[in-house]
Structures are given as C-alpha cells and as structure tokens.
Amino acid sequence: MPRFSTFVVLLSLLVLAGCNRVEPQAKPTLSATFTTGWLDLEKDGTSEWRWSEPTASIALTNDAAQAETVVVEFDVLSISARSLQMTLGNKSLPTLALPLNEWVHQKISVELSAGISPLTFTTTEAGATVAGDTRSLYFCVRNFAVAPPEPAVAP
C-alpha cells in the first residue's frame, strides 16, 4: 500500500505542476522584409505600397526547423502593360501579365524553406513616368502578406 500511496501523491504533484498538459505545436514565425530594388514605402489610411525598380526582392523568413507551406498574398499594379516574372529562391513561380493601370490580386501557395528565402520580381519592359513624378515606375506591390494556409474546413 505505501508504494501505491507514493505513486498517487507523485502523480497528483505532476498534475498540479501542469505536466499533464500537451502544448499545441507552435506555428512558425513568418515575416517579409522588402530588401533590394524598392522605392520608399507609401501609404494611405488602409493600404501600404512600394514602387519598384526592374528587379526587386522581398526576403521571406520562416523560423521553423523545416520547410512550411505558406500563402503569399498581395496586389500588384503597373501603369504600363508588362510581364512580371517571379522566383522564390531558385524556383520559378507563375509569370504575371499585368494590364495597364489595373490592380491584380495574387494569392499563391508556396513551399517556404527554413530560414530566409528571396522572393524576386523581374520585368524587362521599360519603366513609365506620370505627370508630376520624376521617378521611373515599373510595378507597384501593396498589402503584401505571408501567412500559414487557412485550415481546411471539414464537411
């Protein structure tokens, strides 16, 4: 009987100490940093955007120990029709055909390696200017976000 009592006491102490809890798996911390090829941040009350040079990169960071599937979401605009190639690290992503002066929404599921991966945008068409702005404008990205995919909803 003394062994059983000791076991019950030890088990009770472990439960009180919280050792019976199973902690949920931590989600990876994901972040995005505009690195090279971007002009200064612009914003209004609801949106943030940056115009680019012909080649521009965003560093996507995944602090998990392994690759994670993530969703990259943003809007992109060009004031002249152009194609926009995208690569994530060494992997080519779909090429976008940007129409004249129309926001194009993108929501792309990608496999993001652990650590930092560059998302690079490239266009070969010439930049454009608008009245009152001396900058050569290539394409504009607004409301950029990277996040884990939304969980599937069971039927």
Image (cartoon, grey):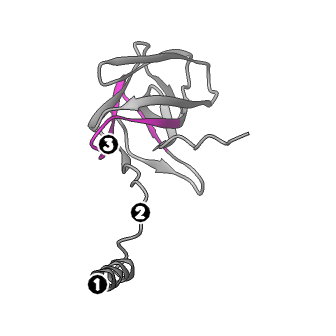
Foreground: disc 1 or disc 3: 1
Q: Is residue 40 above or below residue 126?
A: below
From which residue to which does the magenta span run? 49-73
Q: Considering depth in this image, is 56 or 81 the residue closer to the camera?
A: 56
Residue 127 appears at what percent x and percent y?
Answer: 44, 21
Secondary structure found at label 1 = helix
According to the picture, the residue beneath numbered tag 1 turns out to be 6
Three-letter residue code for mark 3:
Thr
Disc 1 residue crowd, few under 14, some 14–19, many 20+, Cα 10 Å: few
**From mark 3 to mark 2, how far is it between C-alphas?**
27 Å
Which mark is nearer the camera, 3 or 2? Answer: 2
Distance from disc 1 to disc 3, alpha carbons, whole Å, reads 49 Å
Q: Name the residue under label 2.
A: 22
Of 81 and 134, the residue lying toward us: 81
Residue drawn at point x = 68 percent, y = 41 percent = 154
Query: What's the residue type where badge 2 is placed?
Result: Val
- Residue type beneath disc 1: Thr
Q: Which of marks 2 and 1 is in front?
A: 1
Q: Considering only order in the chain, which callout, 2 or 3, is on the residue closer to the N terminus?
A: 2
Nearest the eye: 52 or 120 = 120
N-term-proximal mark, 1 vs 3: 1
Lower sequence index among marks 2 and 1 = 1
Task: State the image quarter where residue 153 is shown.
Answer: top right
Identity of the residue furthest to the front in this view:
1
The residue to which callout 3 is attached is 61
* Residue 35: quadrant of the picture: top left
| Distance from Cα at disc 2 to Cα at disc 1 | 24 Å
Front residue of 12/152: it is 12
